[in-house]
Image (spheres, rainbow, N blue to C red):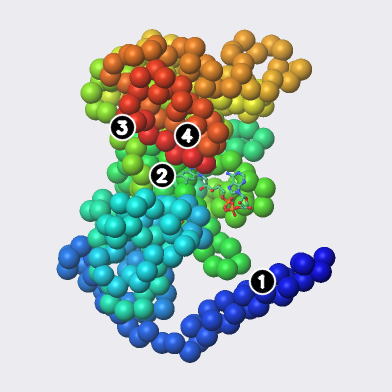
Amino acid sequence: MVFLLPILVFGGLLVGLTIALTVAERVLINYGVCKLDINAGDREFEVDGGQTLLSALNEVKVFIPSACGGRGSCGHCKVTVLAGGGPVLPTETPFLTRVQVRQGVRLACQVKIREDIRIKVPEEILNVKMFSANVSRTQALTHDIVEVNFRLNEPAEIEQRPGQYVQLQAPSPEGPVYRAYSISSPSYEMNDVELIVRLVPGGIGSTYCHNLSVDDPVIFTGPYGEFRLNEDPEVEIICVGGGCGMAPMKNIIYTVYDRWPDRKLWLFFGARTTQDVFYLDEFKELAGKHPNFKVIYALSDPLGEDEEWDGETGFIHLSVDKHIDKNGENRQAFLCGPPPMIEAVMKVLDDKGLKGKDIFYDEF
Ligand SMILES: Cc1cc2nc3c(=O)[nH]c(=O)nc-3n(C[C@H](O)[C@H](O)[C@H](O)COP(=O)(O)OP(=O)(O)OC[C@H]3O[C@@H](n4cnc5c(N)ncnc54)[C@H](O)[C@@H]3O)c2cc1C
Ligand code: FES
C-alpha cells in the first residue's frame, strides 16, 4: 500500500498535467486559418487550425472511413500526410507498419492541424458522398438483430460494390457520432440501402438503429471498403459470416445470382443457437433456383430445444474445413464476424491453398 501511494500521486499529476495542457492548447493557442491541400492542388481549402485532420476533412465534405468515430481505435482513417502533420503519435503506431510510417501514412483522427498541411488520399475516397434518407422498413430478424431499410433522398442513388459499408450518423450527448455498417442490399438496388444491425448493449449506434421507425430521417456517408468481387464467373466464391456478419454476404449472394445464375458460391454461417439463425429458409429457396449455391449453417452452442436442428453443429471454421477442397484453383473468400472466427477461418483457408490476396475480411 505504501508503495502504491507515490505511483498514484505521480499518475494523478500526469493526468492533471495532460488535461491542463489540452485545455490550455484549446483556450490559449490560436493556430488561425491553415491551408489544407489534397492530392497536390486537386482540392484546396482553408480550415480552422487546432482541430483534427479528420474533423477538418469532414467539414470540407471529404469523408474518409472512421469506423470508431475518431476515437483512435479502428485504424481506418489512414491518409498520407506529405507535409505539416507533426510527429507520429504513440496512439497511431499500433495501426501503422514501418513502411507506412516512412511513407507518411497517419491516422487522420490523431493528427492535429497546427500549420498548412498537404495530404494524399485515394481518388475513390473523394467520391464518397453524404446521403440523406428515410427509414422505409424495419424488421426484427432475431432477438438482437434488426434489418433496416432506407429510401435514399439526396443523392437519390448509390453505387456500391458488394461488401462495402456506410457510416451512419447517430446522435449522442457529445454530438453526432458515426458507426460503420455493411450494406446488405444488393448493388443493383440503387435507391435503397439495407443494413443488418446487432444490438450492442449500451452501444450508441446499434441502439439508435434498433429504435428507428418508418419515415425517420437518417444521414450516412459512403460507400467505403476494400472488398472486390472477382468479375470472372469461373471464380468460386466462399462467404463465411457470423451474426451481423451476414450483411455483406447477403449483398454478395444476391449480386452474384443477379449476374451469374450458375456461379459456384458457398455460404457458411455460424450461429450459437437456433435463436440466432435467420434467412435460412430464404437462402434454401434461392439455392433451389441456383444449384451451385451451397448453404451451410452451423450451431456452435445448440440448446436442448434445438434437437430438431438438422444442420451442422460446431464452430463454422470446422464446416469450412469439411466442405472446401484442398488446393482448388480460382477461389475468392469473404469473411465477416468476430475476430476469433476470422482468425480460425483464415487458418483453414490458408491450409486449403487460398492466397491472402483472394481473402477479404471485416472484423466486427
Ligand atoms: C467495416 C465495418 C462494418 C461493420 N458492419 C456492421 C454490420 O453490418 N452490422 C453491425 O451490427 N455492426 C457492424 N459493425 C460494427 C459497428 O460499426 C459498431 O461497432 C457496433 O454497432 C457497435 O457500435 P455502438 O455505437 O452500438 O457501440 P459503442 O457505443 O461504440 O460501444 C458501446 C460499448 O460496447 C463495446 N462494443 C463495441 N462494439 C462491440 C461489439 N461488436 N461487441 C461487443 N461490445 C462492443 C464498446 O467497447 C463499448 O464499451 C461494423 C464495423 C466495421 C468496422
Ligand atoms: S477514426 Fe478510428 S482510428 Fe481514426
Other residues around mark 4 within 10 Å, as few (<14) / some (14–19) / many (≥20): many
In the rendered view, would you say 132 is above or below 333? below
Taking the image as drawn, is residue 196 in sight? no
**Which badge, 2 or 4, comes first in the chain's sequence?**
2
The percent coordinates of residue 165 (x first, y second) are 41, 44
User: Which is more foreground, mark 2 or mark 1?
Assistant: 1
Label 4 sits on residue:
336
Considering the numbered disc 4 on the image, is that residue within a helix, a strand or a loop? strand
Q: Does the closest atom of ligand 1 sit within 8 Å of the Cβ of label 4?
A: yes
Tag on residue 357?
Answer: 3
| CA distance separating discs 1 and 4 | 40 Å
| CA distance separating discs 2 and 4 | 12 Å
Between residues 157 and 339, which one lies in front from this camera angle?
Answer: 339
Tag on residue 165?
Answer: 2
Q: Amino acid at mark 1?
A: Gly
Q: Amino acid at mark 3?
A: Lys
**Left or right, 235 with reference to 211:** left
